[in-house]
Image (cartoon, helix red, strand yellow):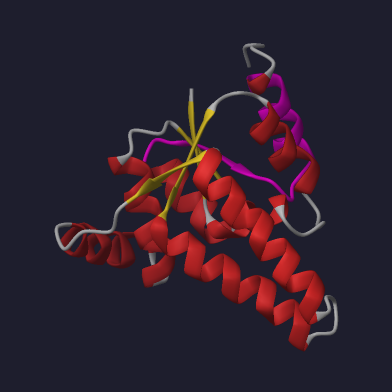
C-alpha cells in the first residue's frame, strides 16, 4: 500500500510531536512511503525553526537532519515536481482555497497514485477528502486510531 506524507506529518518522524507515534508506525509498517521532493526543503525549514524557538540545539538539528537524509536514501519514494503540475496546482488552490505548498502536496499524492494521505493541517485534510483520498489528520486521536486499524489490515 502506498502512503503519502505531507510535510506536517513527515516531520513527526524526526521530531517528537503529537502524532509522531502513528507516523513511526507507518514507517515500521513496510508500506511504501511517498512524498514530494518539496517536502525535503519544508522539513529542513521546520526542523531549523525549532532551533530559533530553542526547542533544539544546532547539534540536535544537524543530527535530526542527518537521520532524515538517511531515510531519504533508504526508505522514501519521492515525487518529482514538474511543470505539468502547475495548472493542476492552481486548480486545487482555487477549488479548495489552500496554499500553493498544500496544493503541490495534494497533486503530488494524486499523481503518485497513493490512496492514503497523511497531514496535520485540517484544511488540507478536508481538501484531500474532497479529492477522494483516504486522508488522516495524524494529530487527531480518532483518525490516528482509524489509521492504525488500516495499517493492521482491519476494515473500517
Q: Is residue 137 magenta?
A: yes
Could you say where residue 109 lies in the image, as x and y percent from the top left? 38, 44
Left or right: 22 as drawn, with respect to 65: right
Q: In the picture shown, does residue 155 fall above or below 45? A: above
Q: Of residues 24 and 130, which is closer to you in this image?
A: 24
Of all residues, the one furthest to the top in this rendering is 154
Could you say where residue 111 lies in the image, as x and y percent from the top left? 28, 42
Q: In the picture shown, does residue 126 fall above or below 66? A: above
Left or right: 47 as drawn, with respect to 35: right
Quadrant of the image for the C terminus? top right
Of all residues, the one furthest to the bottom in this rendering is 52
Is residue 122 among what the camera can see?
Answer: yes
The image shows a total of numbered marks equal to: 0
Span colored in magenta: 131-150
Is residue 120 among what the camera can see?
Answer: no
Q: Residue at x 35, y 60 (%)?
A: 104
Q: Of residues 2 and 90, which is closer to you in this image?
A: 2
Asked where in the image residue 31 lies, by quadrant, the reply is: top right
Could you say where residue 81 lies in the image, as x and y percent from the top left? 28, 58
Q: Residue at x 76, y 30 (%)?
A: 145
Could you say where residue 96 lies in the image, as x and y percent from the top left? 37, 60
Q: Of residues 137 and 84, which is closer to you in this image?
A: 84
Amino acid at each position: 500500500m502506498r502512503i503519502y506524507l505531507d510535510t506536517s506529518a513527515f516531520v513527526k518522524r524526526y521530531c517528537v510531536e503529537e502524532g509522531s507515534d502513528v507516523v513511526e508506525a507507518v514507517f515500521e509498517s513496510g508500506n511504501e512511503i511517498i512524498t514530494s521532493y518539496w517536502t525535503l526543503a519544508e522539513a529542513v525549514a521546520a526542523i531549523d525553526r525549532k532551533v530559533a524557538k530553542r526547542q533544539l540545539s544546532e547539534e540536535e538539528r544537524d543530527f535530526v537532519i542527518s537521520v532524515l537524509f538517511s531515510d531519504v536514501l533508504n526508505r522514501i519514494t519521492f515525487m518529482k515536481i514538474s511543470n505539468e503540475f502547475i495548472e493542476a496546482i492552481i486548480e486545487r488552490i482555487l477549488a479548495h482555497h489552500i496554499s500553493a505548498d498544500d496544493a503541490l502536496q495534494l497533486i503530488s499524492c494524486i499523481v503518485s497514485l497513493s490512496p492514503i494521505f497523511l497531514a496535520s493541517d485540517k484544511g488540507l485534510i478536508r481538501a484531500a477528502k474532497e479529492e477522494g483520498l483516504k486522508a488522516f489528520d495524524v494529530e487527531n486521536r480518532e483518525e490516528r486510531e482509524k489509521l492504525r486499524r488500516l495499517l493492521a489490515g482491519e476494515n473500517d
